[in-house]
Amino acid sequence: MLKFPKAFVIAAASLLLAGAASAETYGLGRPATADEVVAWDIDVRPDGVGLPEGSGSALDGEAIYTERCAMCHGDFGEGIGRWPVLAGGQGTLVRARPVKTIGSYWPYLSTVWDYVHRAMPFGDAQSLETDEVYALTAYILYLNDLVDDGFVLDRETFKTVKMPNAEGFFPDDRAKTETWTADNICMADCKSDVEITARAQVVDVTPEDPTSKHRTAETTENTQPGTDGTVQLSSVAAPDPALIDEGAKVFRKCAACHAVGDGAKHKLGPHLNGVFGRTAGSADGFAKYSKDMVAAGQDGLVWDQDSLTTFLKNPKGLIKRTKMAFGGLKKDEDLAALTAYLQAEGKGQ
Amino acid sequence: MTDTKPVSPKKPSVSTSRRAFLKGGLITGGALAAVPALAKSGDPAILEIQPWANQLGEGVDARPYGTPSQFEAHVRRRNVEWLTADPVSSVNFTPLHELDGVITPNGLCFERHHGGIAEVDPAKYRLMINGLVDRELVFTLQDLKRFPRVNRAYFLECAANSGMEWRGAQLNGCQFTHGMIHNVMYTGVPLRTILEEAGLKTTGKWLLAEGADASAMTRSIPIEKALDDCLVAFAMNGEALRPEQGYPVRLVVPGWEGNMWIKWLRRIEIGDQPWQQREETSKYTDLFANGKARRFTWEMDAKSVITNPSPQAPIAHGKGHTVLTGVAWSGHGTIKEVHVTLDGGKNWQQARLDGPSWDRSMHRFYFEFDWTGAPLLLQSRAVDSTGYVQPTKNELRAVRGENSIYHNNGIQTWHVTANGEAENVEVS
């Protein structure tokens, strides 16, 4: 595209002189510092370029996996609910229901390291140390029977691992194999009989239209608490709407596993409606509590401002083997905001 | 497109709705004849003064950012809960059956996130260019807006659009079968301009685009595409990008699968080989029946769908003159023709294309006909500017099997019954 004739002439001249692509510049932007590039350039290629110094064993990885990954991916990489299956599936790619796992499908080990490092755990990305990523990657290989439990992954051993499905891919060939063209296209009497062979209503998996059902709930949501001028009769201070809004943002760290508010259901963790005043480990219909959590409830632990704050600040400090894989909130203002939000939003049904 | 006139009869039989109204009016008149008052005959919507004609409405400041009419509240994106483990890494669908023209309104553009919506503070927005360039650079949003910019309308289709239909008709609604697409006018800077600012080294053959979200989304893109027509966009349909579409900056990769259009774009790296990231190896690769998978299937092939009538938009007016409409698009260029069949593919007719015919942008088609009230098996078939014809689903399956997930551009069939309702079906 031609921007300015003069610039084009200069560009063309330099092209002739240097034989390399050149073009006008606008002098915009500033040089990136070396530290900035290191901070953001985290990608790892199949040849190992991008892997930092470090190491971790499959055995080390097991403990980290159990704490940080198993609640979604399952103790053996089998996947809970619809969360991704990480292990097994070898030999299933030709079946009607293939199981595409790291062992059965992923062609490159670098992708595992890169993705665990950049995006896992879900909701707490880039929180793993380099050695932890090595250890987890080694453990995932172990779950797929590709290494033994003593395997130590580092930049050198990385080169020794070949993924089982490395040769399972071929480049896009649609231009040669999918050539449906308008030549001789049929417009009339193209076939004699037409029968219906499949029907969506029989399958019956289409969501119902939620529009009318949620209208009441939306009206409620749009009402801002504390702005209607009513006098609070309770001696408890009215919740601060700004604090609740802040808490809603903090809650995003929790939302992968917990729901709260009208219509909230159990997810990986229990729904949090009515959590204030609830005995620990007692949400109706939630069966996935740790033994420690249930025991704490039986010993009399009830969630209130103090106990929730303590728990959310350091979950494992209060409930040693809680299944909640969350490191805890460091900032007091985040704790205050989150508990205010849970108290307000948890009044939902 | 050679013929832009409607091919159906222009004079349909007497409108059933008109006939029904006259009949209703006569009955009302007959009943009222017994009442000796000054009864009037006609439509209460006309005869009675409506509240909006009598009382003043809201003033200009009541809606500083306008929203649709309260009567359009049902026009919304919807998701299919069972598709994904969690709504944070999930997808919802554009209500194609509620739209017309070729531009998708910003608030109705389908969403696909891998780590939720990143709420990027524009004051802290940075775009880094690194790797095989002469100058590794950092741009602010203001820097980007000082480059010469262009306006281009392009469709964005998720590679998995219609992906739930490989094993047969499954979801009963055009929104769900085809709604992972939107068509937007972007304002942005050609990626080429920004790469030239950094100075591409001749060894640079691939580009990695990376997002600032909690999945740090990444895709490898060949340098030829990057230098051809990609945009670094900051506006859609005239306003800033919506948060769910990558605010403040996203990549635009015309004609290629939506996953590559990195949202919340924070970094572009130049390298000499692809990075083989998760979204181009374990996902967005097309598994064949023989267990081998096609990779780097970037282009979206020509496709069309009838949006009305469809399961969520039945024919409500009974037999008589009927407007059928739909959309068509191709990642290889423009749409040259769309054919429509009423009988499941025995006979086809030219649809009428109307509206702008832009390169790799959505096209709108219409087919007006006189519906007899007999059941219909509706299909549309797109032909793009390269001469490629949209295949049937069975033609696709013959090549790929049923485990491909991605790139299902097969012909869609709606079965319209005598009462005007439509169902997602497949035909022999």
Image (cartoon, coloured by chain):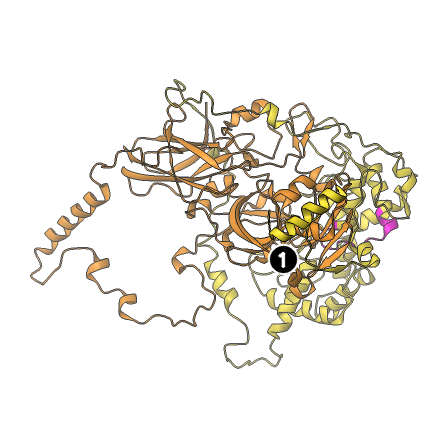
Chain colours: A yellow, B orange
Q: Is residue A59 magenta?
A: no
Q: Which span of residues is magenta-colored? A: A119-133
Callout 1 crowding tier (Cα within 10 Å): few <14, some 14–19, many ≥20:
some
Query: Is A229 located above or below residue B362 in the figure?
Result: below
> Residue B145, located in which quarter of the rendered image?
bottom right
* Residue carrying label 1: B147
| Image coordinates for residue A346, horizontal then vertical, percent | 61, 64
Residue B366 horizontal side relative to residue A232, left or right: left
Residue A38: percent from left, percent from top:
82, 54
Q: Nearer the viewer, residue A22 or B288?
A: A22
Residue B402, visible in the rendered structure: yes
Residue appearing at x 52%, y 76% in the figure: A227
In the image, residue B117 lies at what x, y percent? Answer: 63, 55
Q: Residue at x 78, y 66 (%)?
A: A330
Q: Nearer the viewer, residue A178 or B176?
A: A178
Which image quadrant for residue B338?
top left
Front residue of A222 and A231: A222
Is A128 part of what is drawn in magenta? Answer: yes
The secondary structure that most of the magenta stretch takes on is: loop
Instruction: Establish if A322 lies above or below B223.
Output: below
